[in-house]
Image (cartoon, rainbow, N blue to C red):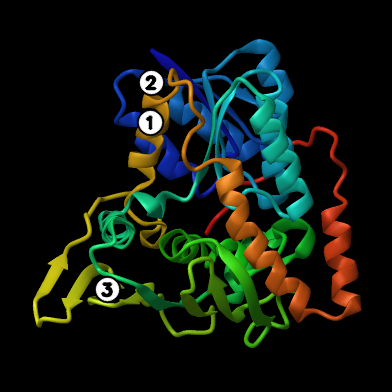
Amino acid sequence: MSTAAIIGCGDVSTIHTEALATMADTNIVAVCDTDPQRLATAAEQHGVPGFADHLTLLDALRPDVVHICTPHNEHASLAIDFLTRGVNVIVEKPLAHSVSEGQRLVQTAEQSTAKIAVCFQNRYNTTAQAMHTLLSSGELGEVRGGCATVLWHRSADYFRDRPWRGTWIGGGGGLLMNQAIHTVDLLQWLLGDVSSISGHAATRFLGDTIEVEDTAEFVAEHVGGARSVFYATLAHAVNAPVAIDVVTEKATLSLRGDLTVSYANGEVVVIPERQAPSGGRSYWGVSHEILIRDFYTHLDHPEPFWISPREAAKSLKIVQDIYQQSYPASAATERATADKTDPTPTRPLQASAT
C-alpha cells in the first residue's frame, strides 16, 4: 500500500485526488495548504490531517509520494525539500518559474534516491502516443516540419481569482508558462530538441489585468532539420481544440482532439482520443490518471521516471528564451526579481491552474 499527500488544495489538486481515488492500493494520508478554509475543506473531504506547513507535515508523517499542486514559484523549492528528505514527488507543470530554479531542481533530482515526475500528462494521450510512435519509427520518412496553435480564452476574472497567475514573480510568465507549455512540450517531444528559436510574446488583450503575456508566437529549428511554427493566444472567444500538424515525407498528421493521418497514397486513418469524465477542467485533458498510475507503478524501478526534471526543463527553456527576446530592460528587471526568489524552504500557497 502506497501513501500520498497533497500539497496545495486548490483547483488542479482535484484531478490528482480523483486519480488517487481510483487506485485501490494508494491512500491519501494528509493535505497541506496555507489557506485555512481550503485546508479545512480538503481535510474534511478526505478524512485526513491538514497541515499549513509542508515541513510540519513531514515531521508528523512520511508519505511515499507528495503531489505538488501549488503556484509555479513554489514548485522547485517544495520539490527540493521533499527530494532531499527521500520523498517521491509528482509536481505540476511547469518545472519551475525560472530557468535557474529549474536547474536547481534538475541537479537535486539527479542526486536524490527519490523519484520525481513532472505533469506533462498530454504525452500519455492516445493521439500523442500514436504520433510519437509513427514519427520515431521512421516509417513516414523524413519529418519536414510542423505547427501548433493554442487558441483559448481567459477572462480578467480568471486572473483576479488567483492573482499570482498574472505575475512574473508568481507564475514566471503568462500564457506560455501556464496554458501553452503543454503544447510547447509536445511540439519538441514530437519533432525533436530545439536547436534555435526566434519568437515574441506580448499582451494584446489583458493589459489592464496582468503584467505577463497573453499572446505569443515562435519559429523553432529542431535537431534533425525540421522546423516548427507556433502561435497561441488567450484572446479567442472560446477554448478551441489545440491543433498540432506534422508534415512528413509520406504523410501529414493532424491533431484536433482526434488524430488524422493522411498518407500520400490517399489512405486516411483516424485515431480517436480517449474520453474521461472528471471534476477538473476539460482543457486539462484525459491523461493525468494514467501518468499518476504509471509513476506509482515505477516507484520500485531503478531508473528515473521518463518525464523527469531534465526532460521538463526543455520546454521551460524554450519559454524563457522567448521572454528574453521579447521584453525590454524594464520587464527583464521584473523577471530577474522572480529569478532571484529566496531559495530557502517556502510555504505552499494555492493550487496552480492551467
| Residue under the image location 87 percent in, 62 percent down | 336
Q: Earlier in the sequence, mark 2 or mark 1?
A: 1
The x, y position of residue 188, in whole percent, is 49, 63
Q: Earlier in the sequence, mark 3 or mark 2?
A: 2
CB contact under 8 Å: marks 3 and 2? no
- Helix, strand or loop at label 2? It is strand
Between residue 110 and residue 88, name the one nearer to us: 110
Count neighbours of disc 3 (C-alpha within 10 A) and say few if under 14, some if 14 to 19, many if 20 or more.
Answer: many
Residue 260 left/right relative to 267? right
Q: Quadrant of the N terminus?
A: top left
Task: Point out the residue furthest to the bottom here.
Answer: 204
What amino acid does circle 2 point to? Thr
What amino acid does circle 1 point to? Leu
Taking 169 as reference, is 89 above or below it? Answer: above
Tag 3 residue = 253
CB contact under 8 Å: marks 2 and 1? yes
| Residue under the image location 65 percent in, 24 percent down | 112
- Helix, strand or loop at label 3? It is strand
Tag 2 residue = 26
Closest to the camera, between mark 3 and mark 1, is: 3
Count neighbours of disc 1 (C-alpha within 10 A) and say few if under 14, some if 14 to 19, many if 20 or more.
Answer: some
Disc number for residue 289: none
What amino acid does circle 3 point to? Leu
CB contact under 8 Å: marks 3 and 1? no
